[in-house]
Amino acid sequence: MPLLPLLLVFGVASDTFTLNPVQRVALPYRYSITGWEVRNFPDKWRHMLDTLIWGVEKSEEKERDDLYRYFDLGRELLAAEDALNRAMSAPNADGVASLEDEVERIAGERSALRDDVEETIESAISTAIRESGLSPWESFVFPPVDIRLAGPPVLLLTSPRDRIARQHEALMDPDVSLVVRERLEDSLMDEHDVAAISFQVGGLAAYPASVLDSIPLADTLRTSAHEWTHHYMAFRPLGQKMFTSPEMITLNETLADIVGREIGNRAAELLPERGKPPPRMDIPVPAPESGLHGQDEHFGFNEEMRETRLRVDELLEAGRVDEAEAYMEERRRLFVENGYPIRRLNQAYFAFHGTYAESAASSSPIAGQLHRFRALSPDLRTFVLRMADISSYPQFLERLEDLERGSASVVL
């Protein structure tokens, strides 16, 4: 999630600026980062101190059992909430009370495990960071890995209709309903002649980082490591210059994806997940309730989305805005028919996903450039340190060119 790294780490971003149109419509549902940190930062460290002073040290087996139980309960909670929603929408609403009790019971048991599970995850990621050489100390990582498994905010953003670009955006409460979100999107599109969309983000690099609590363990580890990378870069030129250009945003986000994946995958080896590997996070998961049982096994999401993005770029560059929008709606229906429930596919959708250059919805060359940069670095530590003091996209390109020539000036 692209953020103002230094400000967000210390909890003052997005709270004190002139309101743009998106912030104005989102104001009643505003998400306060300062409020998040006031509520969560002291509690996290208080729990750690209480555990150190009064707690009984858990065995590794008990930590693993609690970890797996937490994620099992997450799946049970989603199923129970789905059953409750179906019961509440039925004509007679039978069994609602018992289902409400079940949801409350599961949520309560899960909440009781959360603090300890967060520490288990933080410990595994810290170990992976130390093993990578990114921490100069054997027993300490800076900034400390600190996450909160919760519902990160909803991001509401707009793009101009005649091009794909992040224009205005605001963070909203994670509990804002889809009905409200669609009403806000519609009002922005009708009143300001823009494309609008909203998403619940997977993570937010506040401190502690907010990480979505409804994703599998392996994805939780990668997302947590992604957000830690933002924390790390907040103290270095790359992160501090993140918002100086769209390319620098994409550079930071794609770097965090690469680093987060390597560190997260190593942490996943330390905390192996039971059962089959989870689906990749960069591909929307087909909804099991969609009723699409005969999906075409030859339908490739990445290939189809890449084709869509490139064609939309062509149409917009030619000034054929209405045709581009009709094409996006046609393609959206194709994705839905093949089990990918994309709610809106418009310029704002591509503007958001285009920030992450590895996404199929991006047409940025930065992913390929960063993968080349990583391949020319002997290890993760060297890769990160070579990137950390870059303060502009042209400087990144120059350094990549130096690496390809084998220049000694960039060899650490």
Image: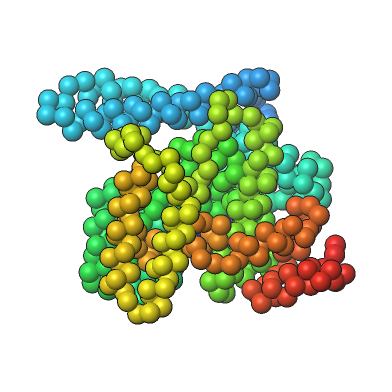
Total numbered labels: 0
> Where does the image place residue 71, in percent across and percent down from the top left?
50, 29
Q: Is residue 302 left or right of 198 when viewed as pictured?
A: right
Question: Which residue, as the protein is rendered here, is positioned at the far left?
Answer: 91
Instruction: Report the front residue among 49 and 399.
Output: 399
Position in image of residue 312 (x %, y %):
39, 68
Percent across and percent down for residue 20 are: 36, 72
Q: Position of residue 162 (x, y in %)?
A: 35, 76
Q: Is residue 147 above or below residue 274?
A: below
Residue at the limit of the structure toward the right, as seen here: 408
Q: Quadrant of residue 61?
A: top right
- If the image is split into quadrants, where does the C terminus sit? bottom right
The image quadrant that residue 349 belongs to is bottom left
Residue at point 44% right, 56% down?
Answer: 305
Model colouring = rainbow
Instruction: Tell me the residue at 38%/41% (across/down).
Output: 296
The residue positioned 51% from the left and 52% from the top of the image is: 204
Depth check, front residue: 64 or 337: 337
Classify 160 as above or below 95. Answer: below
Residue 19 visible to the viewer: no
* Residue 288 vs residue 304, the one in the foreground: 304
**For the view shown, which residue lies furthest in the bottom direction?**
319
Q: Is residue 178 visible?
A: yes
**Left or right, 103 with reference to 351:** left
| Left or right, 112 with reference to 328 | right
Judge whether 72 appears above or below 401 on screen: above
Residue depicted at x 42% and y 73%: 314
